[in-house]
Image (cartoon, rainbow, N blue to C red):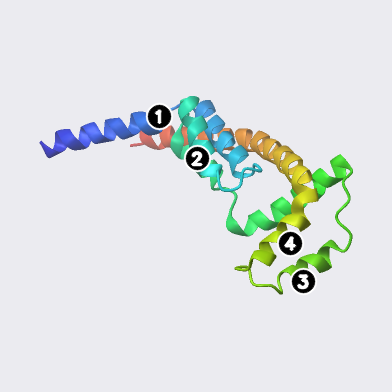
Amino acid sequence: MIHVTRKLIRRWLDSLLHVDDTPERTSAAFAVGVFFGFSPFLGLHTVLGLAFAFVLNLNRVATILGVYSNLPWIIAPYYTFATMGGAALLRTNFPPDFGNDLARLFELSILSHEFWGRLVELIRPLLWPFFVGSSIGAIVLAAIAYPVALAFITSRRRLKVMMHKTR
């Protein structure tokens, strides 16, 4: 009885996660995850990635791996450079004395209303550059992720077949 239950659960999980997809579809799922992982939709990465994986019927595990490729120590530099790139494209100047205003902001308690009011005032002119820069960055990174993932998956599957034949 337990053997039958395990088999049913395994089959259900395999169909839910799409772990037996083709390398192209798995790579596409990873690229979709990378796109959302580096998109401007901070805080919604996982939800959006999984929603698209379900809608497009893609491998959910590969999508989540792509979403979480944007590691915590990468987030700040990535979004800083993406915003700078977006500002250059949109020809948006950073607010005068931005660095000093930002430093003075952190002299306040992050729990205070004044901190959050000044933060919104400080970053408001950078919202469009942030959105444009990180969207372009996400597209570029997803375009790079697809062929890299495809090469990795196909080589791993070839190796698995070769190992299976030698047994």
Q: Tag 3's secondary structure?
A: helix
Question: Disc 2 marks which amino acid?
Answer: Val
In the rendered image, the vertical position of residue 106 relative to residue 34, given as above or below: below
* Residue 113 placement, left or right of 17: right
Query: Do tag 1 and tag 2 residues touch (Cβ < 8 Å)?
Result: no
Q: Quadrant of the N terminus?
A: top left
**Mark 4–mark 3 distance (CA, rounded to whole Å):** 10 Å
Query: Do tag 4 and tag 3 residues touch (Cβ < 8 Å)?
Result: no
- Residue carrying label 2: 47
Q: Residue 104, which numbered label? A: 3
* Other-residue count near label 3 (Cα within 10 Å), few / some / many at <14 / 14–19 / ≥20: few
In the rendered image, the vertical position of residue 107 relative to residue 62, given as above or below: below
Question: Disc 3 marks which amino acid?
Answer: Arg
**Mark 1–mark 3 distance (CA, rounded to whole Å):** 53 Å
Q: Residue at x 62, y 38 (%)?
A: 35
- Residue carrying label 4: 118
- Residue carrying label 1: 20
Question: Disc 1 marks which amino acid?
Answer: Asp
Q: Earlier in the sequence, mark 4 or mark 3?
A: 3
* Residue 161 placement, left or right of 66: left
**Mark 2–mark 3 distance (CA, rounded to whole Å):** 35 Å
**Mark 4–mark 1 distance (CA, rounded to whole Å):** 50 Å
Q: Tag 4's secondary structure?
A: helix
Q: Residue at x 36, y 31 (%)?
A: 16
Disc 4 or disc 1, which is closer to the eye?
A: 4
Task: Name, please, the residue furthest toward the bottom.
Answer: 107
